[in-house]
Image (cartoon, rainbow, N blue to C red):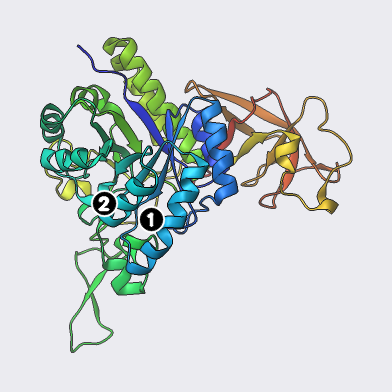
């Protein structure tokens, strides 16, 4: 008998991405505040934005988890009380925590708040889960180094009300459960405190101590070697195995990714999960569709990580650190109010959006006459030609929109829905 349908948990680096994740199928989202989060370069949420995000999510029946997952120093703990009380006032559904000191602070000040234990805690066995369950944690995020058989054994060894959350898609880290000192050593920016510069993606060569300036490729390749550069995790073809292991929450990595990325991954996993729970035959029948669509998402080459045993050389990319990018993000359909929500007084338009047009904050250039795609949440795409572009401030017609973040009114052959993503195939060089 199948377990309950797993939660689909999506990342959100800002309010716009959070709305996109929800529109395209997320059951829950995880976000970071302005402090104590492991993604310092993401936009993140101040108290006002976080309150707005939680209210929007709850209106749509979606849960919100806030990351408080740095490894805290003494100075951090001195500020932690005020921050936990602020989060308690905002009212997210759970806090994601790594540090035992932060955990105890949260239990003391917000005893009714769910606490989820971050993957940073190297949760590799059922003893870890039992330990945190005994202290009052609701959920543990498994280490990415676990296999499906190990996760199944954990599920069989912990209380039924203890939840397992597992990464199923996104960037992998070359360090054990993300505990890496490489960035701190090379650049002075600590990955364990939210400032990773991702030196694992850099190109490396060998230099002999007494031959300064003479670099030798580690492998016989004129392009150099990216010896720490992992492929991205993708488990879209293994939904039955993930469900069979008893995982409660399927987590997607990427709080610094675009709305296009979040929409692409969210709708693909949403459709795959829903199809599987309707029937395994339907899921198997639609596997080619999932494979096709997930490869349209910006990614490095894919791997299944550690789920089917220890990852080897096939999980690495040795010749490049660049992404595969088949589609370009053009923008998200917004209302006039959203289009001008952060505008200066002189930017406000005098007229409403013209009949048959919709609002768009431009992300990349496109032109009148281009054929683009409207991404629907049900994993279908609708191709439509651009009929007209107008500057939303002046009302002037334009042949193209070359300036990023330009406020536009656009008319297509088809009318997209509110919040839908527009994309176009990336031109190949």
Vertical placement of 347 versus 127: above or below? below
The residue depicted at 28 percent of the width and 10 percent of the height is 281
Does residue 406 lie above or below 247 as drawn?
A: below
Q: Is residue 297 visible?
A: no
Towards the viewer: 359 or 226: 359
Name of the residue lying farthest toward the bottom: 210
Vertical order, 324 against 353 (above or below): below
Q: Quadrant of residue 324?
A: top left
Q: Nearer the viewer, residue 107 or 9?
A: 107
Whether residue 397 can be seen here:
yes
Splitting the image into 4 quarters, where does residue 410 fall?
A: top right
The reply to whether the C-beta atoms of the residues labelled 2 and 1 are less than 8 Å apart is yes
Q: Residues within 10 Å of mark 2 (few under 14, many from 20)?
A: many
Residue 215 pos. (x, y %):
25, 77
Using residue 48 as the reference point, say whether residue 75 is left or right of it. Answer: left
Q: Residues within 10 Å of mark 1 (few under 14, many from 20)?
A: many
**Is label 1 in a helix, a strand or a loop?**
loop
Question: Image height check: is 156 above or below 187?
Answer: above
Find residue 120 and name its label: 2
Q: Which residue bears the numbered disc 1?
A: 38
| 319 horizontally vs 197: left or right | left
Quarter containing the N terminus: top left
Rendering coords of residue 300 (x, y %): 35, 46
State the residue in front, 127 or 233.
Answer: 127
What is the x, y in percent for residue 334? 67, 34
Q: Residue at x 39, y 65 (%)?
A: 78
Q: Earlier in the sequence, mark 2 or mark 1?
A: 1
Mark 2 element type: helix
Q: Would you say 312 lies left or right of 66 here?
A: left
């Amino acid at each position: 008998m199948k377990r309950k349908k797993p939660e689909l948990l999506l990342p959100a680096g800002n309010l716009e991405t959070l709305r996109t994740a929800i529109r395209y199928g997320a059951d829950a989202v995880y976000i970071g505040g302005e402090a104590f989060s492991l993604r310092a370069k993401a936009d993140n949420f101040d108290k006002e934005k976080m309150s707005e995000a939680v209210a929007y999510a709850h209106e749509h029946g979606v849960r919100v988890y806030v990351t408080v997952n740095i490894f805290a120093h003494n100075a951090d703990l001195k500020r932690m009380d005020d921050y936990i009380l602020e989060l308690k006032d905002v009212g997210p559904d759970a806090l994601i925590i790594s540090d035992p000191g932060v955990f105890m602070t949260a239990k003391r000040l917000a005893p009714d708040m769910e606490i989820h234990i971050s993957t940073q805690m190297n949760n590799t066995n059922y003893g870890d889960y039992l330990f945190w369950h005994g202290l009052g944690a609701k959920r543990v995020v498994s280490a990415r180094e676990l296999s499906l058989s190990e996760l199944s054994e954990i599920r069989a060894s912990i209380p039924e009300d203890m939840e397992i959350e597992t990464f199923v898609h996104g960037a992998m880290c070359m360090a054990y459960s993300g505990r890496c000192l490489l960035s701190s050593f090379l650049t002075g920016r600590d990955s364990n405190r939210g400032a990773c510069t991702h030196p694992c993606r850099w190109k490396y060569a060998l230099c002999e101590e007494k031959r300064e300036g003479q670099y030798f490729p580690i492998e016989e390749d004129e392009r150099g070697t990216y010896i720490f550069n992992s492929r991205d995790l993708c488990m879209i073809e293994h939904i039955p195995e993930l469900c069979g292991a008893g995982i409660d929450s399927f987590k997607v990595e990427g709080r610094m990714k675009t709305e296009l990325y979040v929409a692409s991954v969210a709708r693909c996993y949403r459709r795959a999960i829903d199809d599987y729970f309707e029937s395994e035959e339907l899921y198997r029948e639609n596997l080619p569709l999932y494979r096709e669509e997930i490869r349209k998402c910006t990614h490095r080459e894919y791997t299944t990580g550690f789920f089917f045993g220890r990852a080897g050389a096939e999980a690495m990319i040795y010749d490049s650190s660049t992404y595969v990018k088949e589609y370009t993000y053009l923008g998200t359909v917004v209302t006039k109010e959203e289009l001008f929500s952060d505008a200066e007084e002189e930017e406000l338009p005098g007229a409403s959006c013209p009949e048959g047009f919709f609002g768009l904050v431009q992300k990349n250039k496109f032109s009148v006459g281009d054929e683009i795609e409207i991404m629907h949440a049900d994993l279908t795409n609708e191709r439509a030609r651009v009929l007209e572009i107008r500057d939303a401030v002046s009302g002037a017609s334009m042949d193209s929109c070359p300036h990023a973040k330009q406020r536009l009114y656009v008319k297509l052959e088809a009318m997209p829905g509110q919040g839908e993503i527009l994309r176009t195939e990336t031109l190949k060089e």
